[in-house]
Amino acid sequence: MSVGQDINSGRIAESRKPMRKWWCVPIFLMSMAFALEAKAEDKFPPFWRKAMTNDPNTNYFLKKYSVPLDDPAGTAVRNIMLARVIGALCQSSKLNKAKVKAYRERTIGGLSPEQLKAAAFQGGSALRSFNYQDLAYLCAGVDYQFGPNGVLIPGAVSAGKGEPNYPYDQRNPYIHLPEFTGN
């Protein structure tokens, strides 16, 4: 009987050997799931946060999009497009349509259709390479450009949380902006 027990115990021991080899697989899979979950919580790369300020001396994108273009009408179109994008895509920010409409009437209201088309082209060209990084930095500096004392359109966009609504996707970082039609 002891011989049979040795054979059976040997079979049991042999059947457990493959399981001993693979005990680390579930642990590895669970750790990968936690790592991916932690990665998903970051809306953008952490090293961006250092320069995401409301100061154009440290925030390159605030300075880039605050500089006037060659044509004042093109600058106005760019500013209106930026206000609309930031109001829509920055977390908890809201667009003040009345302020934007008053700015539009004051700056480009009297343009002919040809002049408006040229201004829309120039304003749209200034935003042609607009991407998620631009948006993230502009969301952080919304007060500088569109706050109560903003340099572009004062009071056009309320300050939100300073971050975009959705997380960064490095496979598709560009943001397609709609054409400016004059409205």
Image (cartoon, rainbow, N blue to C red):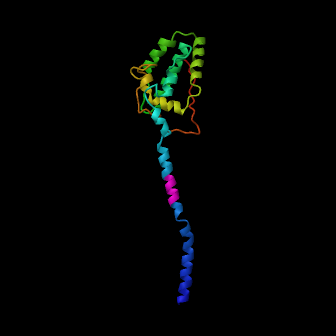
Q: Which residue does the image show at 54% across and 78% down from the upper left?
A: 12
Q: Does residue 59 appear in this view?
A: yes
Q: Quadrant of residue 147?
A: top left
Residue 106 location in percent, x, y? 47, 12
Magenta stretch, main secondary structure, is: helix
Task: Indicate whether 109 appears above or below 78.
Answer: above
Q: Which residue does the image show at 52% across and 9% down from the upper left?
A: 110
Residue 25 location in percent, x, y? 54, 61
Question: Observer-nearest residue: 169 or 114?
Answer: 169
Q: Quadrant of residue 128?
A: top right
Q: Which residue does the image show at 52% across and 33% down from the upper left?
A: 133
Magenta span has 81?
A: no
| Residue with the most extreme front position | 57
For the record, the magenta segment spans 27-33
Q: Quadrant of residue 171?
A: top right
Q: How many marks?
A: 0
Residue 149 location in percent, x, y? 39, 20
Q: Does residue 96 appear in this view?
A: no
Question: Observer-nearest residue: 14 or 121?
Answer: 14
Residue 138 location in percent, x, y? 48, 28
Question: Observer-nearest residue: 78 or 28?
Answer: 28
Task: Indicate whether 117 appears above or below 162.
Answer: above
Q: Which residue does the image show at 53% across and 20% down from the upper left?
A: 78
| Residue with the most extreme left position | 148
